[in-house]
């Protein structure tokens, strides 16, 4: 049985106005908030321990994420006897002994206001008159003095603890009953441990009545931990109250893989996000998925108007620096979503990297922008072996014949074609566009962009024959011309990003239809189109609905193709009706496909395209992928899981 509520989303990218990893509030707002627990009050001095097993929670997280890629004690029990003594606290008792006097005590207020913030913790609120109702209650202990360091030590020692709340509590000295409805008070100094952040907005538990005795709270301080919890195989860093907002990498690729949100009331546990990251990688490897491998994650507690909603986990293919942690929250209507207890973790063995080193990618872009491919061919000095063939024509000449030694002869030409070989070349001036790059980066980038060069030379030799008069036959060698052709044959194009999906948001999991655009075809248009629930392998798919004959197209810009490389193109589709209809995808760099949907299969996911276009050879580096949806009658199309890669 799964205990994790989790949703996955693909990446969103854009300028500053559209955060690449902005919180999908349309989804998050529909997810129930993590369960809130109230601190037990009025039970006198003592200790309450809530067991927590992080290993079990992490194992459950891994299993749940792999299956779907991308305990509180609130009761106040009345004891079976009346007016029995309760453990007494060590705090001051006011005179007169009333709840009003307790709340007004200067000694309590001063202790809370003057309390120091323990190292490794940050103060969230001070001197409030309420304790926390928060997520992941981990028990409490009572103290002899108002000692924030002692409370912090208890939190640090407790697995899963990420915050604590220390306060004075006015408790009854005996269990209130009919014969002792309002007994004398005792003041308990309570240290409550939590597995989620504490905030002033959640410090709302102002007390309770026990018979005629009023339990109240004063001097309430809250502190969140900033210590980086150790996670096996990862190196962590505290980000405070902001989340990672990663740009595209130096190749222009998006590294954001999606998110998971855990709202089951368990303590904040970075290892859960590590488990989700590893499960996502395992699923991708086993399914040849193009979303690549998870090497870095950012985990934090998502807050709504100051109240925790759950543990959020964003996953990435490579490590990002703290400098890109600039997302401090978003608004959805009047609701303010913020970030608390944010940490980033990178894989220590392999923090991930772009498919090309950044300096090579930049040099490659400069070569293309300045049309420096011929320079690259010269720089690399590609040549081929030369084969020389000399054709000799011999003739028997009568004695009475005069031989013209420059008479035309048959010319034999041999062209040799083979893989390029390096030769030593003279040092030449580097173009200005590449002057700032290291020679190794220029050489590597040139190896990706060199263009063929062909050279031809002709060599001729002539011989002269002497002919005697008479009947003696003389043999002469006529002129010979030899042509040598030297050519450079470009290396066979290779896929430099094997397994990478060049289609952005292929499963429509990002907010809206990001990267995709829709429009009518000719004068007809679908009755409705956009995202819908129920995808082939994800939470959503793209829906097009026609009530009668019509057409519409869905398209996006594709970049990063390599000329001459064979690519695979595919998608999943499902139709509702059996009317004659089709999905026809095309791109002006070699792709032309078609899926006829009138073959009788309805309400079942089918792999497309079904006629041709499953593979194609790219004739360019960029193109506009456009898929036309057409029908002769009422029809519903749904598409999902687009893929274009080599």
Image: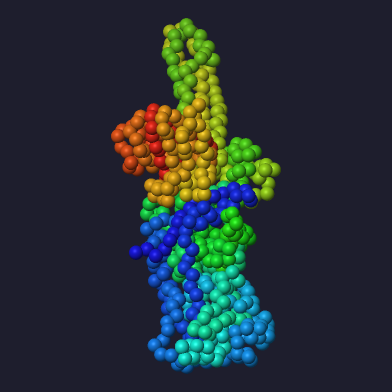
Residue at point 45%, 70% (across, down): 266
How far across and down, in percent of the image, does residue 23 sit?
54, 56
How far across and down, in percent of the image, does residue 475 sit?
45, 16
Q: Quadrant of the C terminus?
A: top left
Q: Residue at the left extreme?
A: 600
Residue 75 in view, yes or no = yes
Residue 545 against residue 78 in the figure, above or below: above
Residue at point 51%, 53% (across, down): 26
User: How many numbered dots are placed on residues in this image?
Assistant: 0
Residue situated in front as seen by the camera: 418 or 50? 50
What's the coloring here? rainbow
Residue situated in front as seen by the camera: 564 or 618? 618
Residue at point 43%, 13% (across, down): 396
Residue situated in front as seen by the camera: 316 or 389? 316
Q: Quadrant of the N terminus?
A: bottom left
Residue 227 in view, yes or no = no
Relative placement, left or right, of 363 versus 296 is right
How far across and down, in percent of the image, does residue 440 sit?
60, 50
Residue at point 44%, 78% (across, down): 75
Relative placement, left or right, of 455 versus 539 is right
Residue 49 against residue 9 in the figure, above or below: below
Q: Residue at the right extreme?
A: 432
Residue situated in front as seen by the camera: 569 or 566? 569
């Amino acid at each position: 049985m799964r205990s994790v509520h989790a949703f996955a989303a693909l990446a969103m990218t854009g300028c500053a106005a559209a955060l690449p990893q902005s919180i999908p509030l349309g989804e998050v707002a529909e997810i129930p908030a993590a369960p809130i627990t109230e601190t037990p009050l009025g039970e006198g001095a003592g200790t309450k321990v809530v067991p927590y097993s992080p290993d079990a929670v992490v194992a459950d997280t891994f299993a749940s994420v792999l299956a779907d890629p991308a305990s509180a004690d609130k009761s106040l029990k009345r004891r079976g006897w009346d007016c029995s003594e309760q453990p007494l606290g060590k705090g001051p008792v006011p005179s007169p002994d009333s709840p009003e006097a307790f709340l007004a005590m200067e000694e309590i207020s001063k202790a809370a206001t003057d309390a120091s913030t323990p190292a490794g913790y940050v103060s969230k609120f001070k001197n409030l008159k309420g304790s926390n109702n928060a997520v992941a209650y981990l028990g409490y202990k009572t103290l002899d003095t108002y000692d924030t360091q002692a409370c912090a030590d208890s939190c640090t020692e407790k697995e899963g603890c990420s915050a604590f709340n220390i306060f004075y509590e006015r408790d009854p000295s005996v269990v209130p009953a009919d014969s002792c409805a309002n007994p004398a008070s005792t003041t308990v100094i309570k240290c409550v441990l939590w597995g989620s952040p504490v905030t002033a907005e959640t410090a709302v538990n102002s007390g309770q009545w026990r018979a005629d005795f009023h339990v109240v709270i004063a001097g309430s301080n809250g502190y969140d931990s900033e210590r980086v919890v150790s996670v096996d195989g990862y190196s962590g860093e505290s980000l405070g109250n902001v989340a990672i907002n990663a740009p595209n990498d130096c190749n222009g690729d998006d590294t954001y893989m999606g998110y998971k949100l855990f709202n089951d009331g368990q303590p904040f546990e970075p290892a859960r996000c590590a488990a989700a990251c590893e499960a996502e990688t395992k699923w991708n490897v086993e399914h040849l998925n193009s979303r690549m491998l998870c090497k870095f994650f950012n985990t934090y507690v998502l807050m709504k108007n100051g109240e925790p909603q759950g543990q959020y986990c964003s996953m990435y293919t490579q490590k990002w620096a703290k400098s890109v942690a600039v997302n401090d929250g978003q608004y959805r209507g009047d609701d303010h979503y913020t970030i608390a207890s944010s940490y980033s973790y990178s894989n220590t063995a392999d923090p991930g990297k772009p498919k090309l080193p950044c300096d090579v990618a930049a040099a490659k872009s400069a070569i293309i922008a300045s049309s420096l491919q011929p320079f690259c061919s010269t720089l690399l000095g590609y040549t081929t072996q030369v084969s020389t063939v000399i054709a000799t024509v011999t003739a028997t000449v009568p004695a009475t014949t005069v031989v013209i030694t420059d008479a035309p002869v048959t010319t034999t030409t041999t062209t040799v074609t083979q893989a390029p070989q390096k030769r030593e070349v003279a040092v030449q001036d580097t173009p200005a566009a590449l002057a700032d790059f290291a020679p190794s980066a220029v050489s590597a980038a040139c190896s990706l962009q060199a263009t063929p060069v062909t050279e031809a030379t002709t060599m001729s030799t002539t011989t002269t024959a002497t002919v005697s008069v008479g009947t003696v036959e003389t043999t002469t060698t006529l002129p010979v011309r030899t042509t040598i052709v030297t050519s450079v044959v470009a290396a066979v194009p290779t896929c430099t990003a094997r397994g990478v999906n060049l289609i952005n948001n292929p499963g429509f999991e990002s907010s809206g239809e990001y990267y995709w655009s829709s429009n009518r075809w000719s004068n007809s248009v679908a009755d409705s189109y956009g995202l819908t629930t129920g995808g082939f392998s994800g939470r959503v798919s793209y829906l097009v609905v026609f009530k009668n004959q019509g057409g519409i197209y869905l398209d996006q810009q594709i970049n990063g193709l390599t000329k001459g490389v064979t690519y695979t193109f595919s998608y999943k589709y499902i139709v509702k009706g059996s009317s004659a209809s089709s999905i026809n995808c095309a791109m002006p760099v070699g792709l032309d496909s078609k899926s006829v949907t009138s073959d009788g299969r309805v309400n079942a996911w089918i792999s497309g395209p079904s006629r041709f276009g499953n593979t194609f050879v790219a004739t360019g580096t960029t193109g506009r992928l456009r898929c036309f949806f057409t029908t002769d009658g009422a029809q519903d199309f749904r598409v999902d899981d687009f893929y274009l890669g080599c």
